[in-house]
Image (cartoon, helix red, strand yellow):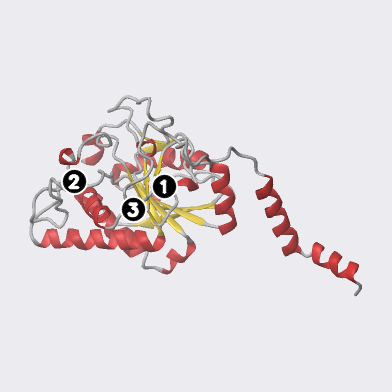
């Protein structure tokens, strides 16, 4: 084959065409130059003392991130517990996720529920699917909440963990109302609690009893993380959920229950094993309890109005 024929054969090879297309798209992307002396935002903390980014609107370019993550061909899992009457929130959760969560990526919704027959039929986009995982219920809502760590941990020990690269764990009584994408993906992330992101550590509602495995003294603590939105790589989420489940088992054996249940143990874990990204309160907010502060440019994942007592006790 003459040199021109070899060149034509090389250029027409499917793999070569794909790489050339990706390279062309990447190098033609036009975006403002990041300036070393100009921070993305001056009104909020954007980096933790252990060099983990804090994700606020205005601190990332989603187009650049999408190009990077699409090259990795990732699959994201989104786990949610729809137990007892919380099943009523599932349709809105899924429909809003289809509009705003990881749009353009492969996503599997893992629905843990004691009512599989009541899981709604929701139209899913290409590359997105729903897996129903039957679980038992418990009389107290606190037990349902605390058992989530055990159930996720055990689930991630099954072969199905190989189906995904990242797992995001969320509360079901919520809805997505703005973009939530690959900017959150990292080995391990936690989300700042909307009620405490402006507070000093001694005001955090950590577990303060030394008898509990979740104990954090008043002079320790970085942030207060909420239990309704956390995640990371499959390996790191498995480590987190397994450690929290084991810590809660020790507490049960000692006849003690942490003040905020699994959330208290999550905070203890993230104090000892720092998250590699921290999400701002944009990623979980409750407009029924808190006004929308001007410092938050977007509210991405928000609470649905409900009567907590009615829902929890049925």
Residue extending furthest toward the bottom: 1
Mark-to-mark CA distance, 2 and 3 = 20 Å
Q: In front of the other: label 1 or label 3?
A: 3
Question: Label 1: how many residues lie within 10 Å, few (<14), some (14-19) or many (20+)?
Answer: some
Residue at the (40%, 50%) spot, across then down: 117
Q: Which mark is residue 119?
A: 1
78 and 193: which one is in front?
193
| Residue that numbered label 3 is attached to | 275
Q: Where is residue 311, by image quadrant? A: top left
The earlier-in-sequence mark between 2 and 1 is: 1
Q: Is residue 265 left or right of residue 169?
A: left
Q: Quadrant of the C terminus?
A: top left
Disc 2 or 3, which lies upstream in sequence?
2
* First reached walking from the N terminus: tag 1 or tag 3: 1
Q: Tell me the quarter of the picture where residue 280 sits.
A: top left
Q: Nearer the viewer, residue 190 or 111?
A: 190
Do labels 2 and 1 touch, CB within 8 Å? Answer: no
| Foreground residue among 27 and 303 | 27
Q: Please report the residue visible at 13 percent of the width from the left and 45 percent of the height from the top.
A: 218
Q: Position of residue 291 (x, y in %)?
A: 32, 24
Q: Is residue 35 above or below residue 112?
A: above
Quadrant where the N terminus is found in the figure:
bottom right
Residue 260 is tagged as: 2
Place of residue 221 in the rendered image (x, y in percent of width and height, measured from the top left):
21, 47
* Image coords of residue 196 (percent x, y): 24, 36
Q: CA distance from mark 2 to mark 1?
A: 28 Å
Other-residue count near label 2 (Cα within 10 Å), few / some / many at <14 / 14–19 / ≥20: some
């Amino acid at each position: 084959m003459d040199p021109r024929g070899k060149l034509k054969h090389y250029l027409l090879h499917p793999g070569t065409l794909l790489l050339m297309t990706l390279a062309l798209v990447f190098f033609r992307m036009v975006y403002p130059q990041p300036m070393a002396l100009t921070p993305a935002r001056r009104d909020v903390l954007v980096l933790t003392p252990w060099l983990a980014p804090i994700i606020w609107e205005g601190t990332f370019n989603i187009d650049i991130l999408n190009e990077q993550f699409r090259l990795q061909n990732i699959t994201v899992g989104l786990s949610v517990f729809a137990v007892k009457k919380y099943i009523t929130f599932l349709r809105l959760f899924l429909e809003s996720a289809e509009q705003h969560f990881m749009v353009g990526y492969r996503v599997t919704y893992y629905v843990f529920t004691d009512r599989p027959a009541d899981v709604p039929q929701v139209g899913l986009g290409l590359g997105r699917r729903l897996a129903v995982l039957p679980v038992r219920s418990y009389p107290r809502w606190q037990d349902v909440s605390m058992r989530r760590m055990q159930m996720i941990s055990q689930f991630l020990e099954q072969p199905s963990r190989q189906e995904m690269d990242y797992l995001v764990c969320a509360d079901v009584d919520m809805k997505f109302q703005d973009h939530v994408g690959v900017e959150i993906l990292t080995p391990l992330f936690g989300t700042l609690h909307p009620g405490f992101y402006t507070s000093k550590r001694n005001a955090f509602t950590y577990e303060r009893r030394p008898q509990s495995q979740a104990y954090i003294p008043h002079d320790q603590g970085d942030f207060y993380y909420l239990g309704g939105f956390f995640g990371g790589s499959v390996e790191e989420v498995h480590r987190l959920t397994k450690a929290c489940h084991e810590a809660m088992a020790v507490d049960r054996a000692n006849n003690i229950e942490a003040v905020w249940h699994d959330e208290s143990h999550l905070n203890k874990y993230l104090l000892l094993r720092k998250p590699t990204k921290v999400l701002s309160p944009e990623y979980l907010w409750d407009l029924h309890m808190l006004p929308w502060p001007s410092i938050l440019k977007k509210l991405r994942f928000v609470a649905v109005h409900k009567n907590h007592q009615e829902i929890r006790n049925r």
